Image (cartoon, rainbow, N blue to C red):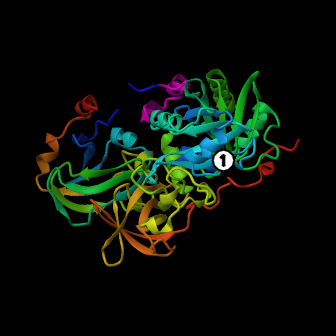
Amino acid sequence: MSQDDRKYATSHEWAKQDGDLIVVGISDHAQQELGDITFVELPPMGQVVEAGDECGVIESVKAATDLYAPVGGEVVAVNEALEVSPELINQDVWEAGWVLKLKPSNPGDIDALMSAADYDATV
Amino acid sequence: MSQRTCLYDVHVALGAHMGPFGGFEMPIQYSGIVAEHQACRQGAVLFDTCHMGEFLVEGAGSVADLDQLVSCPVASLESGQCRYGLMCSPDGGVIDDLLVYRLDTERFMLVVNAGTQADDAAWIESHLGDTTTFTNLSADTAKIDLQGPAAPRIVQGLLGNVLGGLKYYRFVQTLYRGEPVLLSRTGYTGEIGVELYAAPDQAIAFWNEAMALGAEPAGLGARDTLRLEAGMPLHGHELTTERNAGEAGFARAIADDKTFIGSDVVCDAARRKQALAGIQLEGRRAARAGDALCDASGSDVGVVTSGSYGPSVGRAIALGYLDVGLTEPGTDLTVRMARGELGGQVVALPFWKKGTVRKRIEGFLKPR
């Protein structure tokens, strides 16, 4: 079950409002499908992305998958703890496993993403 | 249509994530690949390997016929001993890799991969003389690998003291629940353990009883990371019909004092353009099969055949073929992937050097 306090992209990221920033992680469904996460490539600070742009790589023992920006904006923070402990995503996908924070180009864009219930219905 | 092994219902009840492999629906993982991997290094795990094929080859011509079919020495095998070998085509490619068990003077069991089984059977049957008979035992033979430092004690708990003094690549035939079983000190993990061959009912009982004694189920995901850390090849990756078996470099599996099908190619060092090597990457990011290997000048010098994060090594590791002369440990390389480049270095195999596989078994058994 996905959490109601945030929105979801079809590419399996969650996006949560945090003041005027958007915190981004991957969904619980995504981390379960990937299995043990062994490597996370974080985007450079200051990178400007559009919604749907690649902004990182998540690797598990089984496979590598791209992380896509759920909304457009500038990367203003990355979760450096994932560089040494990528398993944080498996252990705590909603909080400690966050990947990056975006300063959104259009603050309203997050509203266009799916609700938890709508996302869960797609997986 | 995928086949199911006799343990299918057991896997489903354990919550395994199932997936296709070699024509079978197999458990890929249960609790998670890394946890299962570590359980094998530290305790004991069970793998369902019923998908693999078992052939009986027997008769007056069996020794001579098998010595032609496989790369390892057969005539010098003792009863109760098994060897790892390659079955090659005349052009030196690897049709399959297999184990040859000498059950008796003129009686052998071959154990082959699942996906190649039908082709293997046809190839072998077409190369046997009139005094050799072939029987495919696969449908009635279940196989379980019990691997890890706790494995010998679990076997001891279930079967009594049948493993005492058993050396690496030796096997015993005994009874379990009144039926014959074969246990060999072999495996695909780098840890001490056994491969068990039994009737399906015995295998199901063995699986459940071994779990009750502490063995954990492990899937094909962990099987792959364990064998990769142990530097062991996987048919379809390191060994293929397209590549000269001599390039794989498994010298112990290739007899140099006999001829066998393909030996004029396989044993001719001048025909080896590349050699298999272990590559340790700089970080956790994994190279994957098919990625290019490049030298310092950026020229292509090889290809990755298997790659993953190595949970016990704590780094990404890979096996791959490199041009001869570049496989010296310490040689710097670059892996060129679709997503960018990774730095790496050739290292001596196995990647995992603390494996228990060759230790004396007495250290892993309860004193009598």
Instruction: Please indicate whether residue B90 sits to the left or right of residue B156 in the image.
Output: left
Q: In which quarter of the image is residue B300?
A: bottom left
Q: Position of residue B250 (x, y in %)?
A: 56, 58
What residue is at 22 percent from the left and 55 percent from the top?
A54
Across the whole image, how many numbered discs are drawn on residues? 1
Q: Where is residue B303 in the image (x, y as percent from the top left)?
A: 37, 61
Relative to residue B228, is residue A120 depicted above or below? above
Instruction: Please indicate whether residue A5 sits to the left or right of residue B42 in the image.
Output: left
Q: Where is residue B326 in the image (x, y as percent from the top left)?
A: 44, 73
Instruction: Please indicate whether residue B212 sits to the left or right of residue B166 in the image.
Output: left
Q: Where is residue A95 in the image (x, y as percent from the top left)?
A: 37, 48
Q: What stretch is highlighted in magenta?
A: B4-31
Relative to residue A47, is residue B198 depicted above or below? above
Q: In which quarter of the image is the C terminus of chain B?
A: top right
Judged from this view, the residue extending furthest toward the bottom is: B297
Relative to residue B87, is residue B60 depicted above or below? above
- Callout 1, which amino acid? Val
**Magenta segment: does it hold A49?**
no
What residue is at 62 percent from the left and 58 percent from the top?
B252
Q: SS class of the residue under badge 1?
A: loop
Residue corresponding to mark 1? B74
**Magenta segment: does it hold B16?**
yes
> Chain for mark 1?
B
| Residue B177 visible in image | no
Judged from this view, the residue extending furthest toward the front is: B130
Q: In which quarter of the image is residue A105?
A: bottom left
| Residue B78 visible in image | yes
Judged from this view, the residue extending furthest toward the right is: B368
Q: In which quarter of the image is the N terminus of chain B?
A: top left
What residue is at 45 percent from the left and 60 percent from the top?
B318
Label 1 Cα neighbours within 10 Å, binned few <14 / some 14-19 / many ≥20: many
